[in-house]
């Protein structure tokens, strides 16, 4: 069996296990729903979605795509997903991106999706990387390459949401490392995270990814503060 065939088989097994662990429920109300978003919650959340694409000229990435502002109930839902063991919500957040045709077309201009990594210590404590789950679901649905073994986090830093803008910039410096950079050379990379506040985290990640000399780097987040 070739390396590609083996990798494809392993990915299918992992997808099967994810479906067992995270059944299709609406992430917002918890009711069983094959689309991961019920009609009632979709109608309500549609009022919050804005689907923005912003060019970035002073960052190591070229554009920022986000779905909503980080406020109100949407903020509470993201925090629940991230900190209160509601990992199943990744399907619903991915669904919000996938259901918008314009956003999907922009995402498909990239060929490799990379999640913002978390440290081994935080992964062990939380049990999952919230950005990784969303990134993998989007990549699977749009048939794009998913890569989580080139960008790693080597420092267990203070959580960014506990710091001001200046402290965040200092805190994140040198937190990431690039591996297997030849896999990213000449690729169009889309970095995925949950929340964009000052942009210091995704910018530091993009700075690290830029060492691989990709064609382009973009950022997608669920919300912007």
Image: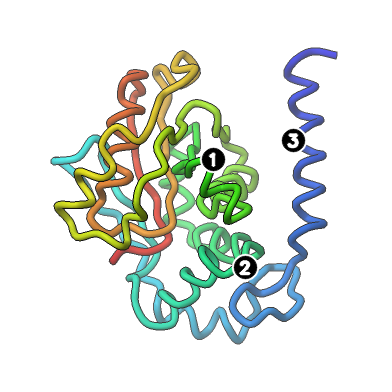
Disc 1 vs disc 2: which is toward the camera?
1
- The residue labelled by disc 3 is 11
Check disc 2 and report the residue beneath it.
86
Few, some or many residues within 10 Å of mark 2 (<14, 14–19, 20+): some
Image location (x, y in percent) of residue 45:
48, 79
- Residue displayed at 28% across by 42% down: 172
The residues bearing labels 1 and 2 have C-alpha atoms spaced at a distance of 19 Å
Q: In this view, does 141 lie above or below 4?
A: below
Q: Residue at x 45, y 30 (%)?
A: 151
Instruction: Tell me which label, 3 or 1, sits earlier in the chain.
Output: 3
- Reading the chain from its start, which is encountered first: label 1 or label 2? 2
Vertically, is 220 above or below 4?
below
Q: Is mark 1 on a helix, strand or loop?
A: helix
At mark 2, the secondary structure is loop
Q: Do the residues labelled 1 and 2 touch (CB within 8 Å)?
A: no
Which one is closest to the eye, mark 2 or mark 3?
2
Name the residue that disc number 1 marks.
Answer: 120
Camera-near label (3 vs 1) is 1
Q: Which of 171 and 13 is in front in this view?
A: 171
Q: Which one is nearer the viewer's eye here, 147 or 170?
A: 170
The residues bearing labels 2 and 3 have C-alpha atoms spaced at a distance of: 23 Å
């Amino acid at each position: 069996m070739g390396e590609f065939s083996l990798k494809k088989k392993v990915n299918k097994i992992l997808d099967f296990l994810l479906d067992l662990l995270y059944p299709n429920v609406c992430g917002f109300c918890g009711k069983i729903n094959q689309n991961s978003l019920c009609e009632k919650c979709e109608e309500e959340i549609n009022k919050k979605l804005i689907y923005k694409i912003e060019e970035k000229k002073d960052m190591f990435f070229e554009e920022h795509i986000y779905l909503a502002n980080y406020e109100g109930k949407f903020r509470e839902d993201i925090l629940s997903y991230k900190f209160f063991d509601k990992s199943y919500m990744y399907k619903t957040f991915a669904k919000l991106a996938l259901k918008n045709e314009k956003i999907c077309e922009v995402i498909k201009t990239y060929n490799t999706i990379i999640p913002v990594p978390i440290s081994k210590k935080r992964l062990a404590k939380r049990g999952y990387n919230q950005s990784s789950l969303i990134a993998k679901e989007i990549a699977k649905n749009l048939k794009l390459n998913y890569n989580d073994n080139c960008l790693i986090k080597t420092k267990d830093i203070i959580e960014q949401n506990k710091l001001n803008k200046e402290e965040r910039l200092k805190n994140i410096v040198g937190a990431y490392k690039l591996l297997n950079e030849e896999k990213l050379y000449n690729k169009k990379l889309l970095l995925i995270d949950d929340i964009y506040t000052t942009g210091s985290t995704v910018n530091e990640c993009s700075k690290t990814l830029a060492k691989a000399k990709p064609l382009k780097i973009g950022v997608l987040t669920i919300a912007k503060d």
